[in-house]
Amino acid sequence: MQKNIVTELEDPILFVALGNPGDRYFRTRHNIGFIFAEYIAKSFQLNEFQYCEKMMSYISVSEQFKKDVVLIKPNTYMNLSGKSVLLAVKAFSVKPNDIFVVHDDVYLDFGVHRLKSGGGGDGGHNGVISIVQELGHSNFNRIKLGVGKPEAYGALKDYVLKNFLDDELSFIDNLWAISWKQIFKIILQKGLHQAMTVFNRRCK
């Protein structure tokens, strides 16, 4: 049964998947966060995403591994993601160390992931910049998904808004998504630092 979207949650874990809304953007590198969210929701049979106008997000609220889990996809476009995140954090009373922002990272090779505990910079990522500005701090956790970067200097904006290649999509479907499911499960069952020990080491 779907829980009441706000009042019945206890110490919720918030996963914020970053991307741009609309079919034209879904398979772009910048939208790897949305792709992550869809795989997680399907793999763990989470409740379907429902649009919440007040939070400007698509939201799935479920219980997994005895934890209340909120998974959101901001509908504001990347540069204004923080507005949705702030609304969700306030509505669900989420603690900073229970926020996990899932986003693309051009400084990681395609297919590489890095988990990071709260604090640190924004890496020049507009979605993360917006979240820091709206929350007033950077004390949230990150799940960084590497999409690589173009060889030509100055082509970054166009690069992240291009679709993944067919072989990249195949890798995501058949290999990378398996790691995502394991990351999600270990974070909920054993905590972020245990997940970092397992998955950050694998990527070196």
Image (cartoon, grey):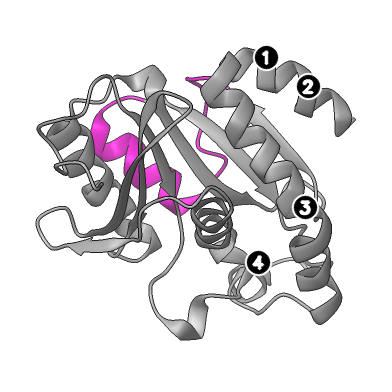
Tag 4 secondary structure: helix
| Residue appearing at x 33%, y 61% in the figure | 49
Give the residue at mark 4: 156
Q: Is residue 139 visible?
A: no
Neighbours of disc 1 within 10 Å: few (<14), some (14-19), many (20+): some
Q: Position of residue 12 (x, y in %)?
A: 30, 27
Question: What range is drawn magenta here?
Answer: 117-137
Horizontal and vertical percent position of residue 90:
15, 32
Task: Between label 1 and label 4, give the one nearer the viewer.
Answer: 1
Q: Is residue 173 left or right of residue 58?
A: right
> Can you identify the residue that label 1 sits on?
194
As shown in the figure, which amino acid type bears the numbered disc 3?
Trp
**Between marks 4 and 2, how big is the CA–CA gap?**
31 Å
Q: What's the distance in space between the residues labelled 2 and 3, CA to CA?
A: 15 Å
- Is 132 a magenta residue? yes
- Local SS, label 2: helix
